[in-house]
Image (tube, rainbow, N blue to C red):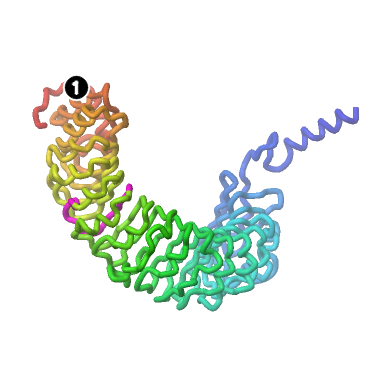
Amino acid sequence: MLTAVLVCFALIWRVVEPGVVQGKRASCTPPISHDGTCSCENDVVTCTGQSLVPTFSTVYHYQKVSIVNGNFRNAIRSGDPFANLRTDELVLHNMTILAIAPHAFLPLKSMLKKLDLSNNFLTVLPSALHDLDVLESLDISENSIGNRNFTEEVLRKIGATLKSLTFGSYDIQQWPVTLKHLQMLQNLNVTKAAFQFMPQDAFYGFSGTLLTLSLGTTGLTSVPLAVAQLRYLQTFNFDHNINVGDYGMNVPLIRGRMPYLTNISLQQDSLKTFPSALSAFENLKSVSMDLNTLDFVSDHAANSVRQIENLSMRNSNISRIPQALADITSLKSLDLSDNRIHSIDAKDVKILHSVKEIKLNNNPILYISNHAFDSNGNLERLELRNTHLKEVPCALKYAIENLTRVKHNFPLTVDISNNEIACTCELKWLADTLSTHQANISWNIIGNCETIVMSINDYLNSESLRDCPTSNIC
């Protein structure tokens, strides 16, 4: 009898427990907002416009709590502002925070893994971080924290668990030497800084753990020699360092010293050519050279990246597809969007034998040769978004026929959206081409008609186009 009562009681409890039905959260209840708004979905809370900390209940453990775009200038400077909060991730972004109570995060001591304090008015690394025992990710970017205020005591405490750190401020005049305590660091992202030099031992303490490094918008005039000490580095983003230029890329690197480096980004570094230093990275797969002035790419320059598979040169003042790319025989993806390319001749793309993806979006293309793409037997995706096209290029017909001849086994996607494509009977050639080869190749054309409210795909399958006479345009 007693056992039956206990079982019934347990069943009742599972039904009436707040927010829980049969062991699962029935709904996500947001905290009580005193001003602004708070919402909750899938255990993720989002609060905006707050000047007071919302009232949390100890009943709920949220996956993530974001309190953004408000005013906490005085709300968390003292007391116990997050007394009942239970969450794995806390975002306090753009909240005009000047200071944080010494033990504000104590209730989150053994649970908070990610903390975002970006875009506030902090001038020193908060001592409240000292209470966080399992913190793995910290973002303090867009705060006026100078290099002298990267408090050693705090960094020593969180260094045992911290794997990711993001910081950035023009108040950082020199490299913060106290970062040496971050012995578990895997991801370091510097979003901005005023320093022009980094010591050769800048990464001491985590040179054997760092996997991703981003150094952006700094006063650096060259790639720091300290980078060569990161023997396990996989990704290096060195972007928006406008004082570097080609000369600043001439750094001595020992071939094979960084065998795990596969991704490099050198965006907006005032470059005019590919750095020869890239040839030192034997396993390099992806290179981004966006926002530079690569109006001419020499054969020698391309030879330094002949081992890569993905290349992006967006918005780099390029007027023709560089013939030097023929030396990159392993290239699979090429992005030349946002350049000055006016025409695409057959010889321009013929050199890209192994390329599967070509992106030419946002170029003022006036002419495409009929045989521009019929030598690319591996082509899977072609993007021509917003290129001032008025009609589907006939080059697509010959590309499909070529892919059929080489027994292409992958679907072909052509994106011609944001163009003024006229959907008339003149498109019958494309419908007939696709119909003829549908048994050999699957296809997808992305884009809408300019003349009618219909996608190009739908128009090609429409009854009205089937009734059109055969088109001999292509």
Left-right relation of 73 to 311? right
Quadrant in which residue 415 is drawn: top left
Out of 68 and 399, give the one closest to the viewer. 399
What residue lies at 68% left-to-right and 65% top-to-bottom? 131
Residue 422 sits above or below residue 387 on the image: above
Outermost residue toward the left in this view: 472
Quick check: can you spot residue 180?
yes
User: Badge 1 local density, few (<14 within 10 Å), some, or many (20+)?
Assistant: some
Identify the element where label 1 is drawn.
Answer: helix
Say whether residue 311 is magenta: yes
Image quadrant in which you'd find residue 206 = bottom right
For mark 1, what is the residue?
A: 466
Residue closer to the observer: 43 or 235:
235
Q: Position of residue 274 (x, y in %)?
A: 27, 60
Quadrant placement of the N terminus: top right
> Is residue 223 shown in magenta?
no
Is residue 92 among the parts visible in the rendering?
no
Query: What is the three-letter code of the residue carrying label 1?
Result: Arg
Report x, y in % for residue 431: 20, 27
Magenta-drawn segment? 309-323
Q: Is residue 271 left or right of residue 175?
A: left
Q: Main secondary structure of the magenta part?
A: loop
Residue 125 in the figure: left or right of residue 325: right
At x 13%, y 42%, the residue is 346
Q: Residue at x 20, y 22 (%)?
A: 436
Query: How far across and how far down the image is residue 210, in percent?
Result: 51, 60
Residue 135 rendering spot, x and y as whole percentages:
62, 59
Seen in the image, is 366 located left or right of residue 196? left
Q: Residue at x 16, y 46 (%)?
A: 348
